[in-house]
Amino acid sequence: MARVYDALLGGSHNFAVDRDVASALTAIEPTAREAARANRAFLGRAVRFLADAGIRQFLDIGSGVPTLGNVHEIAQAAAPDSQVVYVDTDPVAIAHSKSILAGNDRATIVHADLRDPEAILGHPEVTRLIDFDRPVAVLLVAVLHFITDEEDPGDLVRRLRTAMAPGSFLTISHGTLDGRSSQVVEAVEKLYSRASAPGRPRDHASIEAFFDGFDLIDPGLVYLPLWHPDPADVPFPDPAQSWGYAGVARRS
Ligand SMILES: C[S@@+](CC[C@H](N)C(=O)[O-])C[C@H]1O[C@@H](n2cnc3c(N)ncnc32)[C@H](O)[C@@H]1O
């Protein structure tokens, strides 16, 4: 899924099979590429918001193949002392992240799985760069929809929350098929069931529930382009076609 997303974004770290899935997605829904870009643009706006709010530690789970606007670049441009830990399961994402982070003492990538939060929280590279006694931003951007209901994503988020000091932030974006025709829903589900990680789009209420125990920052959980829009971003004519909801919340 890391490489399908990279293909949608126009990156070069993907294989023919990944590009095939990206093209099939685009054939079903022509806005798929714009939606991937809208998600990436949200990530950038959220990191700038978090840096402005004084956050200097970022734990980015499901960080993907490095591309335009990586978290450490944005965070360290805002505050050079920012520390960033990336987490992913995809070997291409890990290898490429390692190569671009070589020589950066304040950023690293860890091979770990969101389905095992304690392994992430206790990983020596995570504890080297993140002090959980201080506020941290946990980013779950376009990753929770790869966790099935049986794997209980709500419980995974709760287990991460227990490690987050007051003043920490949780950032989520999540795929949705809200407002889509049943034809599109069926076609997307069929396509994703062939991929290595089946996708699980969720509705607004289910995604909002992941923020239990946090206070959502205005404007709450909204379509991707509507979260703190930046006039510099490529305009998205119909935000409801962006395939995703996004929100940032604070732990009080
Ligand atoms: C769509 S990409 C999102 C990349 C980046 N967060 C962004 O939004 O631009 C999803 C990433 O989540 C990773 N991923 C999927 N399931 C995961 C899991 N259980 N644990 C950690 N990473 C996972 C994939 O390998 C992929 O790199």
Image (spheres, rainbow, N blue to C red):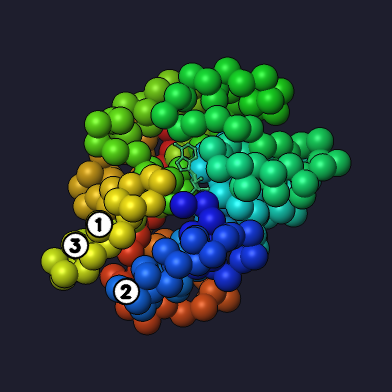
* Residues at circles 2 and 3 in contact by the CB criterion of under 8 Å: no
Q: Position of residue 242 (x, y in %)?
A: 35, 68
Residue drawn at the location 33% of the way across and 47% of the way down: 198
Residue 238 horizontal side relative to residue 183, left or right:
right
Q: Which residue is mark 3?
A: 186
Mark 2 or mark 1, whichever is nearer to me: 1
- The residue depicted at 60 percent of the width and 32 percent of the height is 111
Check disc 2: other Cα within 10 Å, few if <14, some if 14-19, many if 20+. some
Give the amino acid type for the residue marked by disc 3 in the picture.
Glu
Q: Quick one: SS at disc 3?
A: helix
> Of helix, strand and loop, which one carries label 1?
helix
Cα gap from disc 2 to disc 1, whole angstroms: 12 Å
Mark 2 belongs to which amino acid?
Answer: Glu
Counting from the top left corner in percent of width and height, residue 196 is at 41, 46
How far apart marks 1 and 3 lie (CA) works out to 5 Å
To which residue does mark 2 refer? Answer: 29
Q: Position of residue 203 (x, y in %)?
A: 22, 52
Q: Which residue is mark 1?
A: 189
Q: Residue at x 58, y 60 (%)?
A: 14
Identify the disc placed on residue 134. Answer: none
Q: Nearer the viewer, residue 204 or 150?
A: 150
Report if the beta carbon of the residue with label 2 is closer than 8 angstroms to ligand 1: no
Say left or right for 16 vs 105.
left
Give residue 145's position: percent from left, percent from top. 35, 47
* Residue 203, above or below 55: below
